[in-house]
Amino acid sequence: VTPDSFSDGGAVHDDPAAAASAGVTMAEAGAALIDVGGESTRPGAATVWEGDEIARVVPVIERLARSGTLVSIDTRKAGVMEAALGAGAAIVNDVAALLWDDRALEVVAKAGCPV
């Protein structure tokens, strides 16, 4: 749910209901899980403040989780991981291998979730 998302060109980044609906559609079409991210990891992308990232992903994750869709959170930030896991994400996908944020390893260990 980023303005420059590679999966939809940012079409639904500001509409949590539409983003979740797109994820449910992907799951119904056979996707094993939906990976939700609120910060682009493309080279040169601007860093997103943790609060903004949480605001982007949590409403989408809540909707997806309520629908029974398996959700992973795509983030490097421990605070986003905590919020996303609390909202119903079951997996953490961290492109920084839990090394970008000093608390990331603690968060996933406490949650006992796959990484």
Image (cartoon, rainbow, N blue to C red):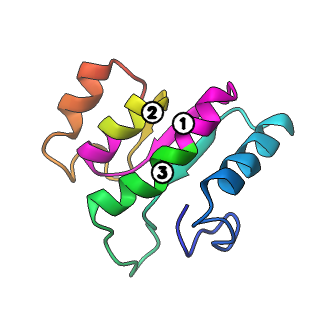
Q: CA distance from mark 2 to mark 1?
A: 5 Å
**Crowdedness near tag 3: few (<14), some (14–19) or many (≥20) residues, C-alpha within 10 Å:** many
Q: Residue at x 55, y 74 (%)?
A: 3
Query: How many residues crowd around disc 2 within 10 Å: few (fewer than 14), some, or many (20 or more)?
Result: many
User: Image check: 2 left or right of 77?
Assistant: right
Tell me the distance, in whole angstroms, between the alpha carbons under discs 2 and 3.
9 Å
Instruction: Give the vertical position of 108 relative to 76 (above or below).
Output: above
Q: Earlier in the sequence, mark 2 or mark 3?
A: 3
Specify start and end residues of the magenta stretch as a single range.
61-81
Mark carried by residue 87 = 2
> Observer-nearest residue: 32 or 23?
23
Would you say 75 lies left or right of 18 here?
Answer: left
In-front residue for pair 59/41: 59
Let me know if residue 70 appears in the view: no
The x, y position of residue 110, in whole percent, is: 24, 20
Question: Measuring 74% from the left and 47% from the top, which residue is drawn there?
Answer: 21
Tell whether label 3 touches label 1 (CB within 8 Å). Answer: no
Q: Position of residue 66 (x, y in %)?
A: 63, 28
Instruction: Please report contact status of discs 2 and 1: CB closer than 8 Å, yes or no.
Output: yes
The residue that mark 3 highlights is 57
> Secondary structure beneath disc 3?
helix
Give me the residue at 69% from left, 29% from top. Answer: 67
Q: Nearer the viewer, residue 50 or 75?
A: 50
Residue that appears at 81% across and 44% down: 25
> Is label 2 in contact with label 3 (beta carbons under 8 Å)?
yes
Badge 3 amino acid:
Val
Residue position for label 1? 62
Q: Report if residue 106 is visible in the image.
A: yes
Q: Residue furthest bottom?
A: 44
Is 115 left or right of 33, judged from the image as shown? left
